[in-house]
Amino acid sequence: MNRLDGKVAFLSGAARGIGGATAKLMAQAGAKVAIGDVLDERGRQTAREIEAAGGQALYVSLDVTSEASWAAATDATVKRFGKLDVLVNNAGVFNGKGVEEATIDEWNRLVAVNLTGVVLGTRAALPALKASGATSEHGSAIVNLASIAGLVGSQLDPLYSLTKGGVTLFTKSTALEFGRKGYKIRVNSIHPGLIETDMGQQTFAMRARQQGTNDTDKARQTTLALHPIGRLGVPDDIAKGILFLASDDASFMTGAGLVVDGGWTAH
């Protein structure tokens, strides 16, 4: 189940956190993985860890806001591994400021990474994904990292929510577009809740400031109470969902959103 034997996957923002956990899990499932990130040393270390465990990995420096950087990264992946079967648009940034508090520069940064980065990644990978999909029984796959903030309104993070809502609809729209054009490329999104990562810690700090304190522990407990499952998520929780969407076990899924949030959006 959920095997990726013989497949090649490219993951953006995969030096650490959800992306890093996913790269390792995909390698364990039989994929050759390419890791793209701006955190060069951390990314190289993740690639070394994958190879030390018996997997095959490549690290490439990637600025997801740059078309040229994406072209170089995808070219390096195909040159090294011969093809590309899976794209995971994972890179993202968080900003918990409201409409009145955020600067235009902060908004532009959110858009550049969370939206433009996904568009550029999709465009850059498309030729290789089309080629591999055409020769595969179940086609190739794109998995976009959205968020539960891209499904429901967020009273504390409206701008971040806007970008992730864009990812959600871009996923559905490209699934329809590629289907119309006859491309054998499935496109799905995954919607994490609050996960124990560096971005998660940023969220706790922002919540504490929004409450007029520096008590991140209290903010963490408040967030925990919103999870009926009784705990916060960890990167592997999301990595397992991404692995499923990338695998042939999800061959009848496209344009869908997989929610992995510990029950947050059940409220």
Image: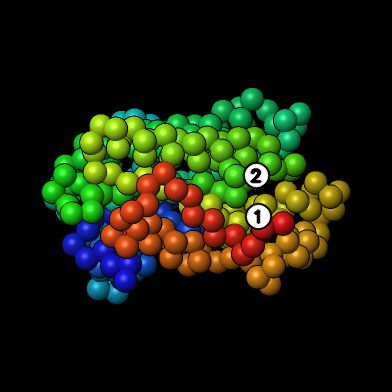
Q: Is residue 182 visible?
A: yes
- For the point 30% across and 55% down, the residue is 251
The quadrant the N terminus occupies is: bottom left
Callout 1 crowding tier (Cα within 10 Å): few <14, some 14–19, many ≥20: some
Answer whether labels 2 and 1 touch (C-beta < 8 Å).
yes
- Residue behind mark 1: 265
- For the point 86% across and 48% down, the residue is 212
> Does residue 193 lie above or below 73 as drawn?
below
Asked whether, in this view, residue 212 is left or right of residue 224, the answer is right
Residue 28 image position (x, y, % from top left): 31, 71
The answer to which image quadrant residue 43 occupies is bottom left
> Does residue 40 lie above or below 196 as drawn?
above
The answer to which image quadrant residue 121 occupies is top left
What is the secondary structure assignment of the residue under circle 1?
Answer: helix
Residue 132 image position (x, y, % from top left): 18, 47
Q: Amino acid at mark 1?
A: Thr
What is the secondary structure assignment of the residue under circle 2?
Answer: loop
> Does residue 237 lie above or below 158 as drawn?
below
- For the point 60% across and 44% down, the residue is 151
The quadrant the C terminus occupies is: bottom right
Q: Amino acid at mark 2?
A: Val
- Toward the right, the furthest residue is 212
- For the point 68% across and 37% down, the residue is 158
Asked whether, in this view, residue 199 is left or right of residue 249, the answer is right
- Residue behind mark 2: 152
